Every structure is written in structure tokens, then in C-alpha cells.
Image (cartoon, rainbow, N blue to C red):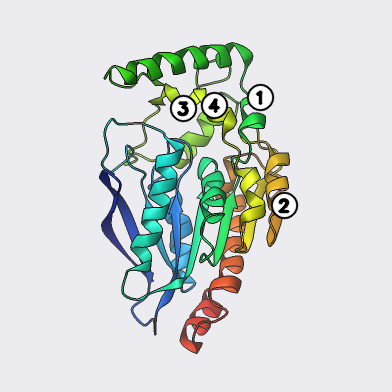
Amino acid sequence: MVDRTDVTFPSGDAHCAAYLYRPDGEASGDVPCVVMAHGFSATRDDRLPAFAERFAAAGMAALVFDYRHFGASGGHPRQLLDVGRQHDDYRAAIAYVRGLDGIDPERIALWGSSFSGGHVVAVAAGDARLAAVVSQAPFADGLTTVAKVPPKNLVRLTVDGLRDKVGSLVGRPPHLIPAVAEPGGYAAMSAPEAVPGFDAITGEDSLWQNAFAARLMLTMALYRPVRSAPGVRAPLLVCVCDEDDTTPAASAVKMGETAPRGTVIRYPIGHFAIYVGGAFERAVADQTAFLQQHLLATAGPAARDRAGAAA
């Protein structure tokens, strides 16, 4: 049994909407917390609750939030995908949970998947207080990721990025382009796994929109979280999908291997398979065990007993 409440917290010029999961009401003392957000254009409801529920059942709180400009969060213009602002949203979420009653501010972990799998490494490199980091199927290196985009799409994405950037300078609304498309179609992601992958993680109640502001494409190749990995002091678990056609596995492996306390676990699956079915069960079990090891090792007997029962 877990308890989930809707909460909001301030970040910059708006508020982020979040779900706060807590272990059952019998928890004794302050508990650790896992701060979680989704990847490229996705929202908090898109399979993240399945992970958060497992972590909460194991004795850890979890905060699952939407970035500004997306989902249930505030922020205008809508669908603005800005790396720096998303990093700031993670930092605001960390500050929020560190100030909550019942949460141990020294046992905060970050969790990210795909695009946010890179975010958590970049943010953790600047926060030595973090107790653990989980990076799942991560966007580790913009250079290798952009190299997988079909050349004709890359040219068009760049042109649209310039159009959007120039328009933003004169006050125009964002020029939106698709996040995913079928192979041969136009989008940031058009690998065969892209459309079925989003179909698998977005339900009828999802607030996901297949659109983002094109200006991101002007800087995506320069975003290289793998270069931040050596600065991450916390234990880092990198869950690598070896058959990933969206975020190259080799860069993810390198990210885990260059972190001082990095651990790499590899799965023979594609990018989106880790969210559902048997692959999800294996990955969430590995992640829960990792988080228990690093967040609950100093917990009181009641928390350790609850973690053991969940395992």
C-alpha cells in the first residue's frame, strides 16, 4: 500500500505539478525520497507511476513531476523543451522534497529516463548531497544521438529550429514540430521503435502532446551529459538497453563506466521496452535493490523491515 497526493512546487516563473508517493502510514521516522521526471516531451503519467509505486512499496517516498511547459505544470509558452529550465526544475524539486516533513533531506535520489536520464547525471554533478542516481536508457551524448537522425530530417530540423529561434526573438509563438513519427516520417525520433514505444507508455488520460518547440534542435548535439559523469559523487546506476535505436547504448555504458561510483546493468531490449512487461519487472527490481542499498542502509529497523518485505 502506498499513499499518493497531488502537490505543486515553485520553479522559476511557474509551478510544477507533481505526484508525491509516500510509504504506508506505518512508516517510522524520516524516509528517503526519489525525485523523478520523464524524458523527451513525455509527462508524469506516462508509466512513471509504475516505478514510483514500487519504490514507495519498498519504503521510499517518490516525487514524480512534470516540467514547466508540459503536462499539468504551468509555464508559457507550451511545449518549450529547454534543457537548462528542465535542470532547474529538477533542482527545484530537490529543494521542495528536502523541506518536506517526513523526508530525510540527506537521503534524496534522482531518477531519470531517456532525455532525463542525461538530466539526472548533469544535475547530480552539481549536488554533492545527493545519495544516489538512477539513469535509465539515457540520452548520454547529443553527438551520437543526433547522428542517428536521418540526414534529410536533420536538415529540416535545423531549418525549423532556426525559424523557431528567430520567431522567439520577435515574440512569435513557438514553431512546433513532432517528437515522434513512423520510419520515413518527419520528427525528432523516427526509429521503428518510436511510435509503438510512445503508444505503449501513453494511456487515454495522458497529457502528452506529440510536439515540441523546434529551437531545441539547434543545440541538441551540444548536450553531452556523459561529460558530467566523472563529477557525480553519488552512486550511479545506468540501465542500458543494448538494442536501443533512440539513445545509443555505447554512450550510456561510457557514462556509467566513467562515473566514480558507477554501475552498469545491460538489458537485451530496445529503448521503450524497459517501461513495460517483463523488461520493466527486471529493471524496476534492479533499481529498487540499488536504491534500497544506498538509501535504506542507514534507516531505522522499521524501514529496513518494510524494505525487506517489499523485496
Q: Is residue 32 left or right of residue 244?
A: left
Tell me the SS state at disc 1. Answer: loop
Residue 17 at what x, y percent from top left?
A: 29, 50
Dot 4 or dot 2, earlier in sequence: 4
Mark 1 packing: few (<14 Cα in 10 Å), some, or many (20+)? few
Q: Earlier in the sequence, mark 3 or mark 1?
A: 1
Q: Amino acid at mark 2?
A: Thr
Counting from the top left corner in percent of width and height, residue 189 is at 54, 26
Dot in front, 3 or 1: 3
Mark 2, residue position: 258
Question: Which label is found at residue 147?
Answer: 1
Residue 165 visible, this orientation? yes
Left or right: where 73 falls relative to 216: left
* Nearer to us: label 4 or label 1: 1
Task: From the image, state whether disc 4 or disc 3 is nearer to you.
Answer: 3
Residue 302 in the image, given as x and y percentages of width and height: 46, 86
Residue beneath label 4, please?
189
Q: Which residue occupies 56% across, 79% down?
A: 308
